[in-house]
Amino acid sequence: MGSKTPQTVRKLYIPVVLLFTASFQLFSQDNGMQAVFDSIIAEADLLYRNEKAVWNSTDLLLTDKTLKRNFGGYVVRHSEDTVFVTYLDKSQEMSIARYAYFLMFFDFPIAVNKEKRPLTSLEKELKTMKVKINNLLGDSQ
């Protein structure tokens, strides 16, 4: 009986060592994956915040009959702690309104500008990128 115990221990030793080695590798990969997961969550959070700002500001825009009649699209961007939603006219060459929201508070805009003005270079660039992405998505269907 005494001779069977060392054999049993030897038989268990290899699987236990393999299990610890595999779990160590798995946990070390988790640290790398955690960074990926964190970046995905941060990107999803930013997307949610942008969409929330667009949703709320569109509701406000549509209560103004003149803006509603001239509405032709929008672009959205963020800068530090603020999300900006710029609404375009039907030709998509002019801004008809711009709403600004704090990143953490979307119930009311912190600033509203309903002055018609030419698009800034950044707004033009965002509009161009949005059109290209929409065209790519449209081609894939």
Image (cartoon, grey):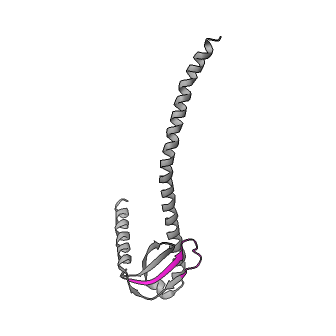
Observer able to see residue 62: no
Observer able to see residue 94: yes
> Is 3 situated left or right of 136 in this image?
right
Q: Residue at x 51, y 46 (%)?
A: 30
> Is 7 situated left or right of 119 in this image?
right
Q: Is residue 103 above or below residue 14?
A: below
Residue 51 position in % (x across, y down): 50, 69
Q: Residue at x 50, y 48 (%)?
A: 31
**Closer to the camera, 106 or 96?**
106
> Is 6 situated left or right of 85 in this image?
right
**Closer to the camera, 4 or 129?**
4
Q: Is residue 1 above or below residue 83?
A: above
Q: Is residue 69 above or below residue 135?
A: below
**Closer to the camera, 65 or 40?**
40
Residue 91 image-quadrant placement: bottom left
How many marks do you count on the picture?
0
Q: Residue at x 42, y 88 (%)?
A: 116
Q: Residue at x 54, y 32 (%)?
A: 19
Quadrant containing the C terminus is bottom left
Residue 113 position in % (x across, y down): 48, 86
- Is 107 included in the stretch rendered in magenta? yes
> In the image as oriented, which residue stretches furthest toward the right?
1
Residue 124 image-quadrant placement: bottom left
- Is 106 included in the stretch rendered in magenta? yes
Quadrant containing the N terminus is top right
Residue 35 position in % (x across, y down): 49, 53
Residue 94 position in % (x across, y down): 38, 84
In the rendered structure, which segment of residues is drawn in magenta? Answer: 94-110
> Is 1 situated left or right of 34 in this image?
right
Q: Is residue 35 above or below residue 122?
A: above
